[in-house]
Amino acid sequence: MEDSIYGNHRDAMIDVMNIIMGSVDELRANMTEEYGSDPVEHCLARIKSEESMREKCRRQCIPETTQSALEVIHDAIGIRVVCAFISDVYRVRDHLKAMDKVEVVEEKDYIKHAKPNGYRSLHLILKYDNKYYVEIQLRTISMDTWAALEHHIHYKKEASEQDKLIIAELKRCADELASTDMSMQTIRDMIRNDL
């Protein structure tokens, strides 16, 4: 049987994943107590599978080694946090960036600067305890729904003459959802200001 691409690091990686998820849970509890509502709809966390990590190494033309998996590729540990409101996305981001032992390696804000296809999300690459990289995606419910549908359509369809039409329609849907996110944020802010 092939040795793990993660060497003997898997248990430590799981610990790091659980520490970060625990910190998000702590923020959720504090905000629920303060505001009466949970800022997070759901969280997903995973350690990239051996097969996926080896495949990514091959795609990037780098050796299939523990060093590649843990130091060159930065998404061995992945966390997605889905929030109801845009302001909560940024609150979770700020919380994660302020954690002890966390260094922000990269931040890409595709909410303020959407990709050309309409994709919106906030991506962080964190390094925990100067050892393990963690990729974090922060999204609203509508951003997450759009990304899931776009992924499904993108990977399941055959190439056809309708591609340009599909791409334009996906972009239109992304823009409408972004507008709805802004409207929902405004409504919530108005309600909170009345309290």
Image (spheres, helix red, strand yellow):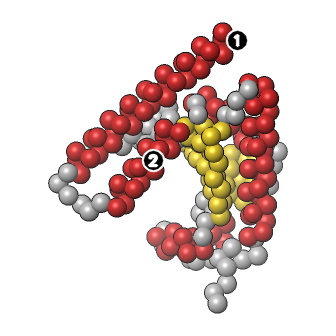
Task: Say above or below: 36 vs 63.
Answer: above
The answer to whether residue 25 is left or right of residue 160 is right
Residue drawn 32% across the image and 35% down it? 172
Q: Residue furthest left?
A: 161
Contact? badges 2 and 1 (CB < 8 Å): no
Q: In what quadrant of the picture does the N terminus appear?
A: bottom right
Q: Residue furthest top?
A: 194
Q: For residue 41, which quarter of the picture?
A: top right
Q: Which mark is residue 147?
A: 2
Confirm whether residue 187 shows in the render.
Answer: yes
Residue drawn 70% across the image and 34% down it? 38
Q: Residue furthest right?
A: 100
- Mark 1, Cα crowd under 10 Å, few <14 / some 14-19 / many 20+, is few
Amino acid on which disc 1 is placed: Leu
**Residue 38 or 167: which is nearer the viewer?**
38
Percent position of residue 81, x then y: 62, 45
Q: CA distance from mark 2 to mark 1?
A: 34 Å
Task: Say above or below: 186 vs 11.
Answer: above
Percent position of residue 13, x then y: 74, 64
Amino acid on which disc 2 is placed: Ala
- Mark 2, Cα crowd under 10 Å, few <14 / some 14-19 / many 20+, is some
Residue drawn 27% across the image and 41% down it? 168
Camera-side mark, 2 or 1? 1
Residue under pointer 1: 195
**Residue 86 or 35: which is nearer the viewer?**
35
Confirm whether residue 74 shows in the render.
Answer: no
Kind of element beneath mark 2? helix
